């Protein structure tokens, strides 16, 4: 229904699989009565220990921030840096449509893949239509980690994308590309300019240190600004009455911390 499919039956160990295409996501947003939409869906997934096999998050440019031909040129001239080493530039031509350009980072087997392409050409839109799409394709643990980022989808997208890919301006006096300045068009597209990592080493549990590191390094500037504007007490009230659903990960972290504190106090008392 509405490009949303629920797959079931078959073997008993196959479980149930829900699939939403791009149009299915729009149907969900239009028809769902959930208060926080995607936040509630992700909370349901986390609280029930469900799996995400693939998650695609896309940015659509309709205002000419991105020039697909400039991106093609900068890609071929190696004016980019990132964690994905493989980049492919493809052209598609049809008799009844303009040439379509797509730039793809990462192999088909990668858990993270980035596609930048001319969506207007793919959809055979009216001449002059500007529609460039930047798409993050995330699989398995990368998809799950993305869904746990406590930011809006747009901010999470920007941070993760920045961690994996940046287009940069060459500097003749510096041979280290990682120090080159980011291009204006890539900077203008992003909602946040702090990279966000979604890779977690195997066996690395979430703990207080990692939570503190994320809050201070990723959101510290924003928190500091709000405290200066509203004061610490109003800021605490805003946090206590925030509309977002609780995340079981943080509830478990608080519970674990309290248990550790009680154990430490009991040990001191016994001593």
Image (spheres, helix red, strand yellow):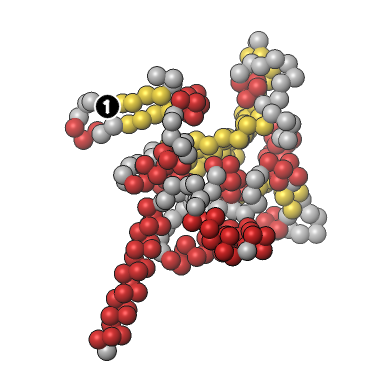
Image coordinates of residue 71 in percent, x first then y, are 70, 36
Q: Which of 254 and 96 lies nearest the eye of the viewer?
A: 254
Q: Quadrant of the C terminus?
A: bottom left
SS of the residue under disc 1:
loop
Is 133 displayed left or right of 63 in the figure?
left
Dot 1 corresponds to which residue? 8
Outermost residue on the right side: it is 172
Is 213 displayed left or right of 261 in the figure?
right
Q: Which of 25 and 197 lies nearest the eye of the viewer?
A: 25
Residue at position x 57%, y 64% from top? 233
Image coordinates of residue 107 in percent, x first then y, are 50, 39
Is 50 displayed left or right of 236 in the figure?
left
Local packing at callout 1 (Cα closer than 10 Å; few below 14, some 14-19, many 20+) is few
Seen in the picture, residue 3 relative to 259 is either above or below; the reply is: above
Residue 11 visible in the displayed image: yes
Q: Which of 231 and 221 lies nearest the eye of the viewer?
A: 231
Residue at position x 49%, y 46% from top? 243
Outermost residue on the left side: it is 12
Q: Which of 123 and 271 lies nearest the eye of the viewer?
A: 271
Image coordinates of residue 267 in percent, x first then y, are 28, 82
Residue at position x 32%, y 80% from top? 265
Q: Quadrant of the N terminus?
A: top left
Residue 110 visible in the displayed image: no
């Amino acid at each position: 229904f509405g490009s949303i499919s629920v797959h079931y039956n078959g073997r008993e160990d196959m479980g149930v699989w829900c699939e939403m295409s791009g149009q299915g996501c729009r149907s969900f947003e239009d028809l769902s009565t959930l208060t926080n939409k995607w936040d509630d869906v992700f909370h349901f997934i986390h609280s029930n220990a469900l799996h995400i096999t693939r998650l695609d998050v896309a940015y659509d440019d309709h205002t000419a921030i991105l020039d697909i031909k400039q991106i093609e040129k900068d890609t071929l001239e190696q004016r980019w840096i990132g964690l994905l080493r493989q980049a492919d530039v493809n052209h598609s031509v049809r008799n009844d449509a303009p040439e379509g350009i797509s730039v793809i980072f990462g192999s088909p087997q990668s858990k993270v893949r980035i596609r930048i392409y001319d969506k207007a050409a793919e959809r055979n839109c009216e001449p002059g239509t500007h529609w460039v799409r930047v798409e993050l394709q995330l699989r398995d643990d990368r998809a799950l980690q993305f869904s746990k980022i406590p930011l809006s989808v747009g901010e999470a997208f920007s941070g993760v994308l920045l961690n994996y890919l940046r287009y940069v301006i060459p500097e003749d006096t510096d041979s280290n590309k990682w120090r080159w300045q980011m291009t204006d068009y890539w900077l203008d597209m992003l909602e946040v300019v702090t990279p966000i990592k979604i890779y977690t080493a195997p066996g690395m549990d979430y703990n207080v240190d990692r939570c503190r590191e994320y809050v201070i390094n990723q959101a510290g500037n924003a928190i500091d600004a709000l405290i200066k504007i509203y004061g610490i007490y109003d800021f605490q009230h805003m946090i206590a009455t925030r509309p977002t659903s609780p995340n079981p990960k943080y509830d478990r972290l608080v519970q674990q911390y309290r248990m550790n504190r009680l154990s430490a106090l009991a040990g001191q008392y016994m001593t």
